[in-house]
């Protein structure tokens, strides 16, 4: 394998993980804020 290809793969995986975590955090904060408003 070429080093550059490996680095690109790691970058792509990092992007997917970042997007996944951002969506999860946004969803959790959104539901918590809605629950707080209801309560």
Image (spheres, rainbow, N blue to C red):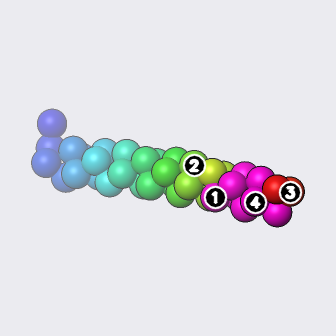
Magenta segment includes 36 = yes
Of pointers 2 and 4, the one earlier in the residue sequence: 2
The quarter of the rendered structure image containing the C terminus is bottom right
Residue located at (57% from left, 49% from top): 24
Distance from disc 1 to disc 4, alpha carbons, whole Å, reads 10 Å
Closer to the eye: label 2 or 4: 4
Closest to the observer, 3 or 23:
23
Residue 29 in the image, given as x and y percentages of width and height = 64, 58
Of pointers 1 and 4, the one earlier in the residue sequence: 1
Residue 38: image tag: 3
Closer to the eye: label 1 or 2: 1
Distance from disc 2 to disc 3, alpha carbons, whole Å, reads 21 Å
Residue located at (86% from left, 57% from top): 38
Closer to the eye: label 1 or 3: 3
The reply to whether the C-beta atoms of the residues labelled 2 and 3 are less than 8 Å apart is: no
Total number of numbered labels?
A: 4
Q: Which residue matches tag 4?
A: 36
Outermost residue toward the top in this view: 1
Residue 17: image tag: none
Distance from disc 1 to disc 2, alpha carbons, whole Å, reads 9 Å
Residue 33 in the image, given as x and y percentages of width and height = 72, 61
**Would you say residue 4 is visible in this rendering?**
yes
Q: Is residue 5 left or right of residue 1?
A: right
Q: Is residue 34 left or right of residue 24?
A: right
The reply to whether the C-beta atoms of the residues labelled 3 and 4 are less than 8 Å apart is: yes
């Amino acid at each position: 394998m070429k080093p550059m290809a490996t680095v690109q793969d790691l970058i792509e995986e990092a992007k997917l993980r970042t997007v996944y975590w951002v969506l999860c955090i946004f969803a959790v904060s959104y539901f918590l804020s809605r629950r707080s408003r209801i309560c």
